[in-house]
Image (spheres, rainbow, N blue to C red):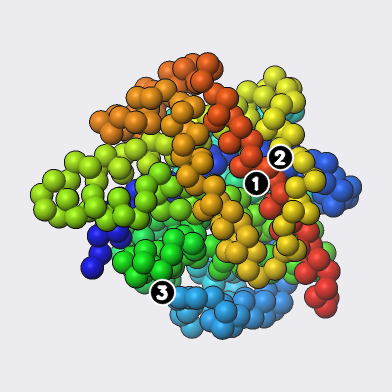
């Protein structure tokens, strides 16, 4: 019996990205955190320098991670032995880099270039912009807000800038087309894509960026594929590599890898990434699927469109708001929420279950209120008309949405500020935990 699985598989391709551009929010969340603000500048270095210098240690780290994943992570797809990272001093840098990507099971097209995403509050216009194709394998969409500049090997750079830049990087194609039924997949042993549409490229990253950990036993029985989130695998991989890089004198890659890890925590703070359909009950999802099976698919398709529209409206509103504040040097509710250190102590200390039991649980619980805030805070036709597909017409409707929201934003503004308070607190708690774990490991 698979009605719920079929419904939500249609929803996910439009929801594979959670918060749009993470970097502007991470600049605000970390700029006053002592562990980041007071950290000494680090020297930028190409990835191959770290790999060449620490090849044997990286091999041990990745083997330990795989053993832990097999022991601890539910539904883990074991890494094929042929992908194991084996030290080989005789190979060249290009093959060593390719072997590293295979061992992590990241896209072969991953760039991992030397770059920064500039803070929109303080754009350094003296440095020429870097072509996005050198940084991301994903073509920037309409209204993309990222601006990249190149780093030179040996250049000193603030850890805040490295961290905030890397927090957006997992959306640059690192997790695309990795499953056995994706086009051009690299034989990584992940099996069929557990949810999302395998034919839609951006949707193929969904299982690495979403975690439906709290849908309940009935949902899980109807749609067992949705229990296969790979967020915890990516967290383990990146956090472990960050610790190794910090301990071995490669601080730039310590901050870079920890930023990659934090992206996945931050994605889970988005209710549309922790709940299959925040605006619909399980009973309603089953009902519209039953009707579709009997030849009346309109309600099911309407739910698909509305959930996608609401996610896009939330993301568009949040992105426009944070970017406008940054460019105008305004201090408002979003900036205050992102920085607020008093929120951090409301949660338990970072640990192995934090992403699932704390972050995802909170976002799942916030789903109905978030969906309701979008409905009352945005122009009705964007969030209640199942005939209007906002995602498919973003270039056309985006400016209109931004204009129309000016007079209707209070409820949505309050909810977005609350969610970004979660974003900031969980990001800082996770970073503290990863720094602590790195310091406790032997050098």
Mark 2 vs mark 3, foreground winner is 2
Question: Residue at (57%, 39%) from the top-left corner?
Answer: 21
Picture quadrant where residue 395 is located:
top left
Quadrant of the image containing the C terminus: bottom right
Callouts 1 and 3 close, C-beta under 8 Å: no
Picture quadrant where residue 382 is located:
top left
Quadrant of the image containing the N terminus: bottom left
Q: CA distance from mark 1 to mark 3?
A: 32 Å
Callouts 2 and 3 close, C-beta under 8 Å: no
Mark 1 vs mark 3, foreground winner is 1
Task: Determine whether the residue tagged by mark 2 lies in a helix, strand or loop.
Answer: helix
Callouts 2 and 1 close, C-beta under 8 Å: yes
Task: Determine whether the residue tagged by mark 1 lies in a helix, strand or loop.
Answer: helix
The residue that mark 3 highlights is: 189
Residue 428 lies, in percent from the top left, at 74, 52
Q: Does 105 appear above or below 336?
A: below
Circle 2 residues within 10 Å: few <14, some 14–19, many ≥20: many
**Picture disc at residue 338:** 2
Q: Does 348 appear above or below 371?
A: below
Question: Residue at (47%, 44%) from the top-left corner?
Answer: 368
Question: Residue at (19%, 41%) from the top-left corner?
Answer: 298
């Amino acid at each position: 019996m698979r009605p719920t699985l079929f419904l939500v598989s249609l929803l996910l391709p439009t929801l594979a990205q959670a918060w749009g551009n993470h970097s502007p929010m991470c600049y605000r969340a970390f700029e006053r955190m002592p562990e980041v603000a007071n950290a000494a500048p680090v020297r930028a270095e190409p990835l191959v320098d770290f790999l060449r210098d620490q090849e044997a240690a990286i091999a041990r780290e990745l083997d330990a991670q795989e053993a832990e994943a097999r022991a601890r992570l539910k539904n883990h797809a074991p890494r094929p032995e042929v992908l194991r990272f084996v030290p080989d001093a005789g190979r060249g840098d290009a093959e060593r880099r390719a072997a590293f990507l295979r061992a992590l099971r990241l896209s072969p097209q991953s760039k991992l270039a030397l770059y920064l995403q500039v803070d929109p509050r303080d754009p350094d216009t003296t440095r020429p912009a870097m072509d996005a194709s050198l940084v991301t394998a994903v073509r920037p969409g309409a209204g993309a807000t990222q601006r990249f500049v190149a780093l030179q090997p040996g250049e000193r750079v603030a850890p805040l800038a490295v961290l905030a830049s890397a927090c957006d990087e997992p959306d640059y194609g690192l997790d695309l087309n990795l499953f056995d039924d994706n086009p051009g997949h690299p034989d990584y042993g992940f099996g069929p894509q557990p949810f999302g549409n395998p034919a839609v490229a951006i949707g193929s990253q969904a299982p690495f960026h979403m975690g439906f950990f709290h849908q309940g036993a009935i949902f899980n029985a109807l749609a067992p594929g949705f229990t296969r989130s790979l967020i915890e695998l990516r967290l383990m991989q990146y956090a472990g590599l960050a610790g190794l890089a910090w301990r071995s004198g490669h601080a730039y890659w310590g901050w870079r890898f920890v930023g990659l890890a934090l992206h996945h925590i931050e994605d889970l703070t988005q209710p549309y990434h922790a709940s299959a359909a925040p605006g619909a009950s399980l009973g309603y999802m089953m009902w519209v699927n039953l009707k579709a099976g009997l030849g009346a698919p309109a309600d099911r398709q309407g739910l698909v469109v509305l959930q996608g529209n609401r996610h896009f409206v939330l993301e568009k509103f949040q992105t426009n708001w944070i970017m406008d504040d940054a460019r105008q040097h305004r201090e408002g509710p979003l900036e205050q929420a992102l920085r607020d250190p008093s929120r951090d102590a409301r949660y338990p200390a970072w640990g192995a279950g934090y992403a699932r039991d704390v972050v995802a649980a909170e976002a799942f619980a916030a789903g109905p209120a978030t969906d309701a805030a979008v409905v009352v805070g945005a122009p009705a036709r964007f969030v209640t008309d199942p005939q209007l597909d906002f995602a498919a017409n973003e270039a056309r409707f985006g400016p209109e949405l931004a204009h129309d929201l000016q007079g209707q934003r209070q409820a949505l503004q309050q909810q977005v500020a609350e969610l970004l308070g979660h974003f900031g607190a969980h990001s800082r708690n996770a970073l503290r935990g990863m720094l602590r774990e790195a310091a406790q490991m032997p050098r």
